[in-house]
Every structure is written in structure tokens, then in C-alpha cells.
Amino acid sequence: MNFDVHDGPGAGAETILLSAGLGGAAGYWAPQLAALRRRYRVVAYDQAGTGRNRRELPKEHSISAMADEALAVLEASGTATAHFVGHALGGLVGLELALRRPERLASLTVVNGWAVASAHTRRCFEMRLALLEHEGPAAYVRAQPIFLYPADWLARNSARMAEEEAHGLAGFQGADTLRKRIAALLAFDATPRLRSVRLPTLIVAARDDVLVPSTMSEDLAWAIEGARLYVAPWGAHAINVTEPDAFNSMLLDFLERKAKRQAG
């Protein structure tokens, strides 16, 4: 597994492990790195089948297998415990780790995630797969921002979106890999197990997310004992990209409050 280690302010700094969504690449978290590194050591990785870890995935790929990847990154980076921050699919990986290996996590943050995919989210992925099947990768990549960003933000960032489209097509993970990863996230269902999560947990959502209804995050927060819920009025699915300053402040506040509770 290829991963990046960004040193923090000192040798004793706690570690944050960042796990991206369906795109899978560590670079997704670029808007967070500077803010997080002021207080934490940060590890980010490309998920299997994506980025620098491009390879064929097994036929029955799963969130459980992706959790094993995250554990391998913790081992390889010499990290005993980490604050896990996952976006969408990455959040599912965090939930799986919280249930299977809670001793490896100091806290869990799930951004626009879910316990089980809603009918609406399934419809969105079905349409994206149909676009991939009938129109090809270029059309799939071109349509992707519609599911990630608010319309007004897209209108203001057309040049940036053109660059992102070119980058996304150049680094496209492959149709077969994408199908397997989507199948894995749609098969995931943590609903019967959520009451077993005993970690400090932050659930983040955006009210205008067109891919994952914010009610999915509300359901997660209700089911996980003591979970803190933050629902932003704007920012859409990739809220850490569209509202990086607010997102970074909220995440750091959650982590610092946890540290103060432990110290107290």
C-alpha cells in the first residue's frame, strides 16, 4: 500500500488517518493537510485499485477488505492508534474498523456516510454506472461534479472543474475497479451493529448533498451512543472541499474537545 506521512508539530503528536471516498486517492484531502498538520501527524493513503495502488481487485471486493487495507497502512506507518476520518466510502471503512478493531482508533469521523445505502443513493449509483456503461469513462468523469458539489459553487469554479476533469480522466481507476468498489459500498450494512460502536464519534453531513441524504447521517448519529452530529446547510457531498475552513475548524474542535475530556 502506498501512503503519505505528513509529520506534525512534534514527535509525540497524535495521528489522523484520512480515508477518501469512491475516488480513493489520498490527494482528496489536500484542503485539510495544512490545518491538521499544525497539531497532528497525518497519514493519507490511496485505496486498493486507485491512484498509486492500482491493481486488479477480487471479484467479491468488500468494505471489510478495505478495512484490512487501512489496518495495513497503520502497521506500515508505525501507527498504534489513530483518529480516523473517512469520507463517504471511507466513512464506511471507519465504521467497519470501529466495530472490528476499536483499539486501533482514538476517534471516528464519518463525513456524508451511511449505515446502509438509501434507495436514493442506490438510484444515483445506478445512473452513474449506466453512464459509464453506455457513454464511457469520459462522460462518467464529466458528470461526477454534479454529485459532489453545489451548483452555485460549480458555476464559480468552472476552470477548476475543467482541470479536475482532466486529472480525473488521466487517473481513472478503471471501469471494472469502479464497479467492484460501488458494489462493495452498496452491499455494506452496519445497521444491526451500530450500537456496538463505543468510540468518540463525529458525524458530518451537508443538507444539500444530492448523493447521500443528510438523514442518513442523522440516523447514524442517533444509533451511535454519544455521537456528535453536525449538519451544514450548504457544501454538498464534498463539503471538506467546498467549505474547507469551516470543516477543518469543526474537525479540530471535535478532536480538541476529546483531548480535553481525556485530560480532565
Image: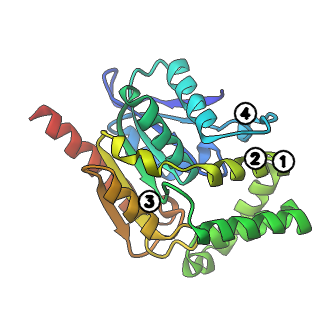
List x then y, in percent, for residue 162: 74, 67
Q: Nearer the viewer, residue 11 or 126?
A: 126
| Sequence-first tag of 3 and 4 | 4
- In the depicted structure, whether residue 165 falls above or below residue 195: below
User: Real-space Cα distance between discs 2 and 3?
Assistant: 30 Å
- Residue tagged 1: 176
**In the rendered structure, which amino acid carries the disc numbered 2?**
Lys
User: Real-space Cα distance between discs 4 and 1?
Assistant: 15 Å
Which label was assigned to residue 180? 2
**Tags 2 and 3 in contact by the CB under 8 Å rule?**
no
- In the depicted structure, whether residue 211 falls above or below residue 67: below
Q: In the image, what residue occupies the spot 37% across and 64% down?
A: 218
Badge nearest the viewer, 4 or 1: 1
| Badge 3 element | helix
Badge nearest the viewer, 3 or 4: 4
Q: In the image, what residue occupies the spot 60% across and 72% down?
A: 120
Which label was assigned to residue 53? 4
Q: In the image, what residue occupies the spot 91% across and 68% down?
A: 134
**In the rendered structure, which amino acid carries the disc numbered 1?**
Asp
- Residue tagged 3: 244
**Tags 2 and 1 in contact by the CB under 8 Å rule?**
yes
**In the rendered structure, which amino acid carries the disc numbered 3?**
Pro
| Badge 1 element | helix
**In the rendered structure, which amino acid carries the disc numbered 4?**
Asn
| Badge 4 element | helix
Badge nearest the viewer, 2 or 3: 2
Q: Quadrant of the C terminus?
A: top left
Q: Quadrant of the N terminus?
A: top right
| Sequence-first tag of 1 and 3 | 1
| Sequence-first tag of 4 and 1 | 4
| Sequence-first tag of 2 and 3 | 2
